[in-house]
Amino acid sequence: GAVVSQHPSWVICKSGTSVKIECRSLDFQATTMFWYRQFPKQSLMLMATSNEGSKATYEQGVEKDKFLINHASLTLSTLTVTSAHPEDSSFYICSARDPDRGHEQFFGPGTRLTVL
Amino acid sequence: GIQVEQSPPDLILQEGANSTLRCNFSDSVNNLQWFHQNPWGQLINLFYIPSGTKQNGRLSATTVATERYSLLYISSSQTTDSGVYFCAVRYNQGGKLIFGQGTELSVKP
């Protein structure tokens, strides 16, 4: 149980285009989901907290207009990287909290974004 | 804010050896999790352990919340144990999970 899926697993896009990443909790309902970014050889950096039915809460320094988050249902959150540039290339990981398991967090497999 | 420090930053082991990874945190927490990030980037939940001791096969973990540290024990290490081990803590029920910098483990055959 407690599986989180992410799609796509990798994407290559041209500079200036937008990319959408989906995160789903497959066997539990997640009122709260999280989006992280990870650079090579570094730890995970929280970008934003996504709450179902309300606006996301962004961490300091994360551009809301560049990283659009939508949490439309209890099992789906999406991250859209708008007008992507090479510096947005990174590994993006989503996470969901299972309220029935003491709020333990589970992580998706990640999406590797490369912007050319 | 809460600081999470992991040690050692890197560790090289011979297959079959045992190891202990440490996580220190700077404030009272109500959640602590250990993860293993495999070479493909997937974070695998190892333990959800805000306090006490748990064991799962060759792995075990102990959190002493009053002294603000947690230990992850790996016994009889295997090459598949290689990867980065992260400790992450949360200090209140609705708060965010704060990650340490990780310990990169390499197990040689």
Image (cartoon, helix red, strand yellow):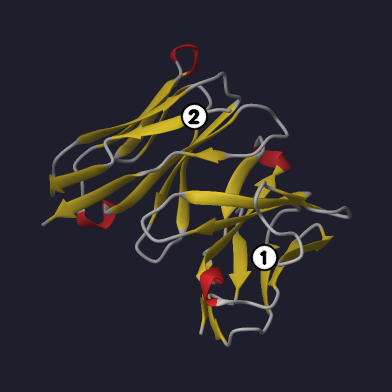
- Which disc is residue A23 wearing? 1
Asked if one can make out residue A112 in the rendered structure from this viewpoint, the answer is no
Residue at 33 percent of width and 41 percent of height: B57
Query: For residue A105, what is the image quadrant?
Result: top right
- Whole-percent x, y for residue B37 in the image: 40, 54
Quadrant of the snapshot with the N terminus of chain A: bottom right
Q: Nearer the viewer, mark 2 or mark 1?
A: 2
Relative side of B28 to B16, left or right = right
Which residue type carries mark 1? Answer: Cys
Residue at 10 percent of width and 57 percent of height: B109
Q: From what the image shows, is residue A103 above or below residue B109?
A: above
- Whole-percent x, y for residue B78 in the image: 21, 51
Say whether mark 1 and mark 2 are on the same chain: no
- Which disc is residue B3 wearing? 2
- Whole-percent x, y for residue A108 in the image: 57, 61
Q: From what the image shows, is residue A63 above or below residue A82?
A: above
Q: Secondary structure at mark 1?
A: strand
